[in-house]
Image (tube, rainbow, N blue to C red):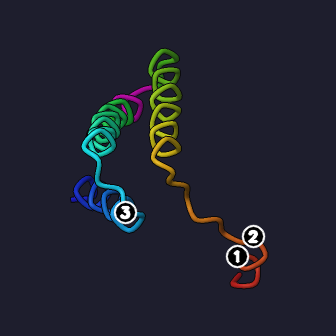
């Protein structure tokens, strides 16, 4: 469920920016492939820490950020002062 929502959110963000080129949508599929791999690695890491899995996880998240950056998508900045005011 979360995977479908994530993909839909990325595609909507691209559509909102008027982006619909197949090559860029293929990048979303590539991102989702990394998403699956990251889920598998996280599952293995819960069973026990392994340095090679940790390194692979860092590389995958780096690639995922790179794809989002290539697509021109960035996370929304949160004002830290607002967080502290809520506490």
Q: Quadrant of residue 12?
A: bottom left
Disc 1 target residue: 83
Label 2 SS: helix
Percent from the top left, x then y, of residue 71?
Answer: 45, 47
Q: Where is 25 relative to 59, above or below? A: below
Q: Vertical placement of 48 versus 36: above or below?
A: above
| Farthest residue, direction bottom | 86
Dot 1 or dot 3, earlier in sequence: 3
Q: Quadrant of residue 36?
A: top left
Element on which disc 3 rests: loop
Q: Estimate the spatial distance between the alpha carbons at disc 2 and disc 3, rounded to whole Å.
A: 31 Å
Is label 2 or label 3 in front? Answer: 3
Residue 18 — which label? Answer: 3
Callout 1 secondary element: helix
Magenta portion: prevailing SS class? helix
Residue numbers of the magenta segment: 44-48
Residue 31 place in picture, x, y as percent: 35, 39
Percent of width and height locating residue 13: 39, 63
């Amino acid at each position: 469920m979360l995977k479908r929502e994530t993909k839909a959110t990325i595609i909507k963000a691209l559509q909102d920016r008027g982006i619909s080129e197949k090559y860029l949508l293929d990048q979303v599929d590539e991102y989702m492939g990394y998403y699956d791999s990251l889920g598998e690695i996280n599952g293995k890491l819960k069973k026990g820490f392994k340095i090679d899995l940790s390194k692979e996880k860092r590389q995958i998240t780096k690639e995922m950020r790179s794809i989002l950056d290539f697509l021109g998508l960035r996370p929304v900045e949160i004002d830290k002062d607002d967080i502290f005011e809520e506490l």
